[in-house]
């Protein structure tokens, strides 16, 4: 009885997470950092031997998508518009991680319930095959 109420509470929290996920707006993975660059021109200030002044700062968005690292420069005017999407993605990941944790808890209570310790978790043995009888004709 206790397990059922606990599982139902966990499932109710998962339903709440589903509603929050649907309410999220546009999302984008990654983070923005400021980068300074050198241009390669030997006469430029960025390559001076004493006190070089690199170009920048430039905003750079970095993230992983489908197992690949992606880096893109973002125009200065777009950084503010991108920030809410990055925050929404962090919220998305937080909600998904919580959903997974709740699902694991439900699985532990459903499949590995301490009340079922007396029962064997081993698979049933295979039914024995019927023996074949050979007939010999004379």
Image (cartoon, rainbow, N blue to C red):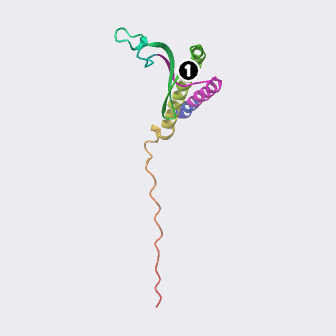
Give the position of the N terminus as an image quadrant. top right
Query: 34 and 117: which one is in front?
Result: 34
Dot 1: element? helix
Residue 43 placement: quadrant: top left
Q: Residue at x 57, y 28 (%)?
A: 9
Query: Few, some or many C-alpha atoms within 10 Å of disc 1 (few <14, some 14-19, many ≥20)?
Result: some
In x, y percent, where is residue 40?
Answer: 43, 19
Can residue 108 be found in the magenta stretch?
no
Total numbered badges shown on the rendered structure = 1
In x, y percent, where is residue 63?
Answer: 50, 26
Numbered range of the magenta stretch: 9-35
Mark 1 sits on what residue? 86
Can residue 12 be found in the magenta stretch?
yes
Residue 74 placement: quadrant: top right
Extreme residue toward the front, this view? 43
Q: Residue at x 56, y 14 (%)?
A: 76
Q: With respect to residue 19, does 58 lie above or below?
A: above
In x, y percent, where is residue 88?
Answer: 58, 21
Q: Residue at x 47, y 38 (%)?
A: 113
Query: 122 and 44: which one is in front?
Result: 44
Q: With respect to residue 105, does 46 lie above or below?
A: above
Q: Residue at x 46, y 85 (%)?
A: 136
Extreme residue toward the top, this view? 51
In x, y percent, where is residue 14?
Answer: 58, 29
Extreme residue toward the bottom, this view? 138
């Amino acid at each position: 009885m206790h397990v059922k109420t606990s599982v139902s509470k966990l499932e109710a929290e998962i339903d709440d997470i589903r509603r929050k996920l649907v309410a999220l707006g546009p999302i984008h993975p990654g983070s923005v950092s400021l980068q300074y660059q050198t241009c390669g021109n030997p006469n430029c200030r960025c390559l001076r031997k004493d006190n070089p002044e690199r170009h920048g700062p430039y905003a750079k968005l970095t993230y992983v998508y489908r197992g690949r690292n992606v880096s893109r420069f973002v125009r200065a005017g777009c950084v503010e518009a991108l920030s809410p999407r990055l925050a929404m993605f962090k919220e998305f990941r937080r909600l998904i991680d919580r959903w997974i944790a709740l699902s694991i808890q439900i699985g532990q209570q459903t499949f590995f319930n301490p009340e079922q310790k007396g029962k064997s978790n081993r698979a049933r043995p295979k039914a024995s095959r019927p023996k074949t009888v050979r007939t010999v004709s004379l």
